Image: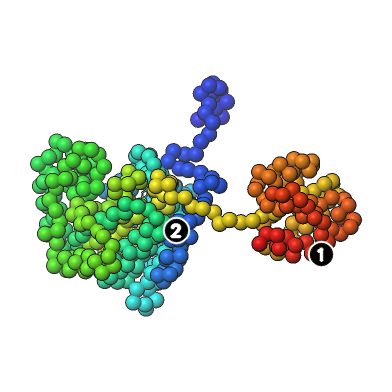
Amino acid sequence: MNEKAVREKPKAEKEAPEAPRGMHDVLPEDWLARERVGTLTRKFAEFYNFTRVETPLLEDADLIARAVGPDTDVAEKELYLVRPKSGDALALRPENVTGIVRAFAEHKLARGAAFQKFWHSGPVFRQERTVQPGRLRAFTQFGLEIIGTNDPLYDAELILIFWKVLEELKLKGLVLKINSTGCRICRPAYMRQLQSYYKNHADRLCDDCTRREKTSPLRLLDCDRDDCMALKADAPSFFDKLCSPCSTQMTGVLEYLDETGIPYSLDNLLVRGLDYYVRTVFEIGIAGMPGEELGALAGGGRYDYLFEGLGFKATPASGGALGIERVVAAMRLQDIAVVPKPERRIFVMHVGELAKKKLLQLMEELRTAGILVDEALSKDSLNAQLKFATKDGSSIALIVGQKEIFEGSVIIRDMKHATQETVPRGRMVEEIKKRLK
Ligand code: AMP
């Protein structure tokens, strides 16, 4: 639209600007719960020997499409594309695994170790068709990747960590669903079975599934349209068609989970929305409690062929991601309060311009001594400042006027009892600390 057209738009039509659809501002009151999830996930990651890797928000669009699968919703419809002035198209990352795999190969991160464990956290972007609570277009993932081993022990360890994080957040009704989606040996026969099942119901498939039935039949199990979901219920199961190595791998994961005592349910039709997953796939969500409607809080699986699929040295790997916004939403729905650590702060007030001039440096002294300071110094009247101090909930106030400046003292006021005492400036920090104990 040109500038003139914008200028001439009738007033009534102009709407106040809002955040893009499906994207949210994180406001001060949102941070407490978010930080709780962020701190806990980071603590777990580091405790289980994962080291952090961050990759750029933008990756080569073609690389992403090849990684997640060209037939997936993520590649076909949900990529936010960025066209640079020169060079290939980039996309805002819709997940983090592609970037990590690329970085692992690019920087030769194998480094002769048996395997490597990485964690990552940051925003991802998907242009979801429908936006609803728990289904956003910009959201934040915390992820764990174990690269260089196909031992089922590590699939179980990943699941264990996500489970423990969610448990420690006190979320109720957690359920773990797990499945094997086979490998390139056993998958083709299963896909043929799926194709013949869906061919018999071709008239009920959505347009996407009609197309994908030929090219990528596993995707049909992942469609969220009502008719296709209804058909899924009677689709053939993969369990009895797994080849022997896949079957052993799956049994291995389940045995490790049995040892940990984490309850799971086998879901033989669980596939995930990204094509790179093979063998183990899992999701942790909520059942029978508020938050069920949000879908999976965490999910992941093996991506043993992704490295070679992208032209890198074949390297088995497994990983998973947890959606911070979904977890925070679940905590809210289950009334899980995050209580801020009680912090005692002092409210600094001035009486007169001369005193005000001295207060920036005085507050610096307090802060350097580790004392939390609040103020409303832009207000000139002491009464107005006292009102803000009461609202702030500070137990102690520090008042400085011209007299105190000349005398080299400060007034310490007990806000609750409305009593006050003058103390020498040199003992200010010590006296405040005594009262804040
Ligand atoms: P995925 O990358 O699809 O395996 O998803 C991993 C986790 O990211 C999920 O379990 C969710 O918690 C979160 N997630 C995925 N898609 C969305 C979305 N559209 N909005 C919010 N969170 C999401």
Residue 316 appears in the picture as rendered: no
Front one among 1 and 359: 359
Can you tell which mark lies on residue 416? none
Residue kind at label 2, given as amino acid type: Ser
Q: Secondary structure at mark 2?
A: strand
Residue at 54%, 31% (x, y): give it.
16
For the point 20% across and 57% down, the residue is 266
The number of numbered discs placed on residues in the rendered structure image is 2
Count residues near mark 1 (Cα–Cα under 10 Å), then give few for <14, some for 14-19, many for 20+.
few
Q: Quadrant of residue 147?
A: bottom left
| Residue 153 seen by the camera | yes
Q: Nearer the viewer, residue 45 or 130?
A: 45
Between the C-alphas of marks 2 and 1, the distance is 46 Å
Q: Nearer the viewer, residue 66 or 226?
A: 226
Colour mode of the rendering: rainbow
| Left/right of residue 14 with respect to residue 296 in the rendered view | right
Task: Write the residue at 70% across / 60% down.
Answer: 435
Q: Is residue 36 above or below residue 198?
A: below
Quick one: label 2, few (<14), some, or many (20+) residues within 10 Å?
many
Quickly name the residue at label 2. 121
Q: Amino acid type of disc 1?
A: Gly
- Front position among marks 2 and 1: 1
Q: Tell me where residue 223 appears, x and y as whole percent.
A: 24, 44
Q: Residue furthest right?
A: 406
- Which picture quadrant has residue 199? top left
Q: Which residue is mark 1?
A: 426
Residue 226, horizontal then vertical, whole percent:
23, 38
Q: Is residue 242 left or right of residue 73?
A: left
